[in-house]
Amino acid sequence: MRYFKPRLQIATLAPPQTHLLSKIGGLPWGLPAHRWPHHCGYPQKLIAQLCHQPPMLDLGDENAVLHLFMCGECGGIDQERTGLDAFILNRSELHNALATVDDYDHEPADYAPLTGEAWITGWTEHDDGIRASRLPEFYDEKKLWSLQDEFPQIPWFQSEEDTKFGGSPRWTGNGPMDFPPPPFQFLLQLGSYLSVEGPPPAARDVGCFVETYAPTDRGDTHTDSPDPTDNRLNVPWYILRARRLTPLLRLHQLRLRRHCLRLHRPHPITPHPPMVLQPLNAA
């Protein structure tokens, strides 16, 4: 199955945002205040604002913009999933500036004022070698384990594969869970860690801790600390890099948030589930 992985730019290393773009974290671009979801008494945190960009993300209309939010207080893990919101707006509904609302920068006990921000600047295309006709097997626990035995070359549990658009979902060791009844379409998955090409930046430039470790028995680590007076809210939680003996591709990983999110588009629409977007047969 074909899928796509985003190329990312850390927002705190770039000039200020001046237009709508697809991104993870930070503040939403142009979101009207009345559309900002709240939960547990506070505005939810933006997880992603994503533009229609087929074949990576097909939202059915060239002006569609997908918004994903999560409650920073409860993480949206209550039984009804009421602390998660997903909705699509037309570009014409968005203002031409970054949006804020009262208490947007509230800092929960187990979260940051904002989700760390990274912009999608491009894509890499991949294929896992599994036929699309076998996609239903990814939602059946026993069949999924059989797939993992059949395709041992696939990095099923590597964090580099947790963020992907299209194709098939990657589950944790707990197996398939929390997906809607069929028919539905798997759209994308955002992991807690995001892989970024190139050497890690200096902590004082990016605004967060940067930790480099050697995967040896000694567990050698080096931590670069940010400027304690840096008050930027959209910094990554921290950056982690493993030193490899023969690096083919230099990657560092951004820890932006604490949870992994998988997004499905179910049919038919029901009133309030957090991941409902539109019917499969919608224009």
Image: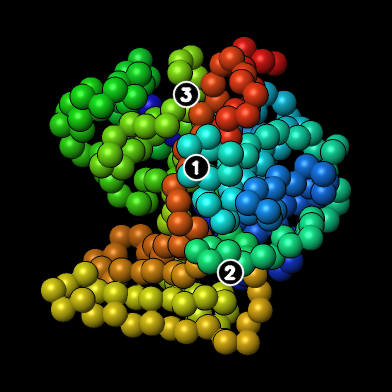
Q: In the rendered structure, find residue 180 and report the number of the disc placed on it.
A: 3
Spatial CA distance of label 1 from label 2 is 27 Å
Tell me residue 68's x, y (percent).
62, 43
The residue under the point 35% across, 60% down is 249
Q: Tell me the kind of residue under disc 2.
A: Val
Q: Nearer the viewer, mark 1 or mark 2?
A: 1
Q: Is label 3 in a helix, a strand or a loop?
A: loop
Marks 3 and 2, the one that precedes in the sequence? 3
Marks 1 and 3, the one that precedes in the sequence? 1
Tell me residue 197's x, y (percent).
45, 60
Q: Nearer the viewer, mark 1 or mark 3?
A: 1
Structural crowding at the residue carrying mark 3, measured as other residues with C-alpha within 10 Å and reported as few (<14), some (14–19) or many (≥20): some
Q: In the rendered structure, find residue 78 and report the number of the disc placed on it.
A: 1
Q: Which residue is mark 2?
A: 235
The residue under the point 86% across, 51% down is 96
Q: Tell me the kind of residue under disc 1.
A: Asp
